[in-house]
Image (tube, coloured by chain):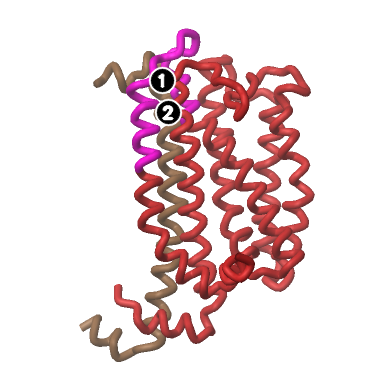
Amino acid sequence: MWQWLHSWGSPRWFYLRSGRLLFGLSLVTAGFLAVGVFSGLFLAPADYQQGESFRIIYIHVPAAVLSQNVYITVALAGAVWLIWRVKVADVAAKAAAPIGMLFCALTLLTGAVWGKPTWGTWWVWDARITSTFLLLFLYLGILALRQGLPESTSGRSCAVLALAGLVNIPVIKYSVEWWFTLHQGKTFSLTQAPSMPAEMYWPLLLTVIGFHLLFLLALLLAMRAEILEREQTRDWVSRLVGGYSP
Amino acid sequence: MTEWLAMGGHGLYVWTAYSAALAVSVWVIASPLYRRRKFLHHHRRQKSPCLNKHASE
């Protein structure tokens, strides 16, 4: 088991093995997203208070959950890099951060276009919105460090910043309970029955899973591109390039 | 169809959200593919100039 896990830490092994997963993963991702988005747009009934604009939750909630999970991934990968110096972990941390940043921006944007027709405002400095905004800045900080520092030290600095910023994650999660402000409470729970009818709930579950699969796919692709660039002087990359036919 | 697109008057909001999501999804998949392709093209060219000359003719 450890041997197997250890072999994934090698960039070459990771590159070659991950290539075999891409096709299947793309199909499953496309399936979840297609069914989820279709049922969210066509099958789910309009909300009795929000009307049709509630359909934005099929983007907003998955993007919000994902942007926090990607952040946790960046921090954990950073920790693995700091502690065990596993090269692939640093590649993962670097590849995941821009994806998380985009989904975090998508969360804020979709929240704004939902807030306008529903709350009557694009933006309020509510606890959850503010902490999500802070998450975006943590991502931007990590990306800036990655860009600005030399490659020998950027991994370490990014990992430290990502780990320090981890305190913001429970703040986002509990913000709707600690401060009773405008943003409504949690949409889902692993332990309680859904608070909405099944035909509204199932599309949401599908898009949440679909977004996570999409992240996994995007992460693998970005890591593969990063590994090639980092290992370009190695023999295995030369052989791979030699055998490449466009 | 037009009625569905209008989303009960909230069409602009709903479609802005869905198009932004589509743009993000396409970007996160296409940009690493493009980066890898560019890498392979560039290095293949460096490695085998004859092959490349052949291809451009």
Q: Are marks 1 and 2 in contact (CB under 8 Å)?
A: yes
Q: Which residues are magenta?
A: A31-58
Q: Which residue is mark 1?
A: A199
Query: Could you classify mark 1 by the number of other residues whose Cα lies within 10 Å: few (under 14), some (14-19), or many (20 or more)?
Result: few
Q: At 20% from the left edge and 83% from the top edge, which residue is drawn?
A: B57
Vertical order, A166 against A58 (above or below): below
Residue situated in front as seen by the camera: B12 or A65 = A65
Q: Main structural element of the magenta stretch: helix, strand or loop? A: helix
On residue A203, the disc is 2
| Residue A202 x %, y % | 44, 26
In the figure, the shade used to draw chain A is red
| Residue A86 x %, y % | 67, 69
- Residue at the extreme front of the image, as rendered: A1
Q: CA distance from mark 1 to mark 2?
A: 7 Å
Q: At 48% from the left edge and 31% from the top edge, which residue is drawn?
A: A205
In the figure, the shade used to draw chain B is brown
| Residue B18 x %, y % | 42, 33
